[in-house]
Amino acid sequence: DTGVSQDPRHKITKRGQNVTFRCDPISEHNRLYWYRQTLGQGPEFLTYFQNEAQLEKSRLLSDRFSAERPKGSFSTLEIQRTEQGDSAMYLCASSLTSGGADTQYFGPGTRLTVL
Amino acid sequence: AQTVTQSQPEMSVQEAETVTLSCTYDTSESDYYLFWYKQPPSRQMILVIRQEAYKQQNATENRFSVNFQKAAKSFSLKISDSQLGDAAMYFCAYRSLHNNDMRFGAGTRLTVKP
């Protein structure tokens, strides 16, 4: 078990470009979450998958953001036409459904800088 | 909407001493989950401790314990016998039973002095 991994760890892009991030959850975990964390703040929920189904989306997730989990394993988060306000750490977490609140295991994050 | 407030942006503690980090939250729900997460510098976030709102007994994990006051909507974290490795950002989080939208506070940066 290698934990949750994210790629890339850092991304610098110019305003208006598209970027895509990847998250590989812990192998047997059926739930996957995306969060955004800006400097000095706690993570903010963006979206959540159970297997390949995207079940919840935050109002923070504008139409420039899209997430997929095509086979219920890894997930991608794409941001189109990036803006400077998109600069943040993007965190992925995964969990295994349990009877109560399943524990979310976080990845190291992808730090996005939009110039 | 549920909100989580951590009123202490920074705290410091002497090694081997005890420190308490504060957290309050706002909700109209009666059943929910509360968490404390630790985020060391440049490292990923890990779960420290969790509490189910329906349980009256305060959760404990080794040197970490909580003081859960449901009526006051307060959920503080006590770290006993502080160690240098405890230095990190600590985030309090709330999660409803009805969705998977976990709400985090702004965090408290804990410094441990040798």
Image (tube, helix red, strand yellow):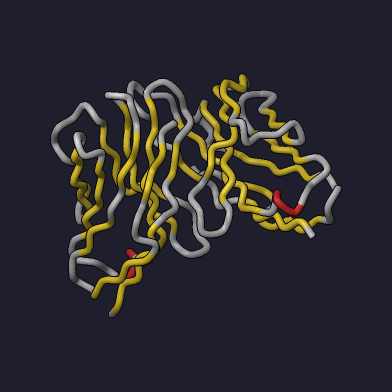
**Residue nearest the viewer, comparing B94 with A103:** B94
> From the viewer's perspective, is B37 left or right of A15?
left
Q: Quadrant of residue B13?
A: bottom left
Q: Would you place residue B92 above or below residue A28 in this image? A: below
Q: Which residue extends farthest left?
A: B57
> From the viewer's perspective, is A17 left or right of B11?
right
Q: Would you place residue B46 above or below residue A99 in this image? A: below
**Could one spot residue A20 in this view of the protein?**
yes
Q: Quadrant of residue B34?
A: top left
x, y percent for residue A7: 68, 49
Total labels: the figure holds 0
x, y percent for residue A28: 50, 30
Residue at figure coordinates x 86%, y 48% from the top left:
A16
> From the viewer's perspective, is A41 left or right of A24?
left
**Residue nearest the viewer, comparing B64 with A44:** A44
> From the viewer's perspective, is B54 left or right of B90?
left
Q: Would you place residue A58 above or below residue A89 in this image? A: above
Residue at figure coordinates x 56%, y 58% from the top left:
A39
**Could one spot residue A2 in this view of the protein?**
no
Residue at figure coordinates x 33%, y 21% from the top left:
A99
x, y percent for residue B25: 33, 40
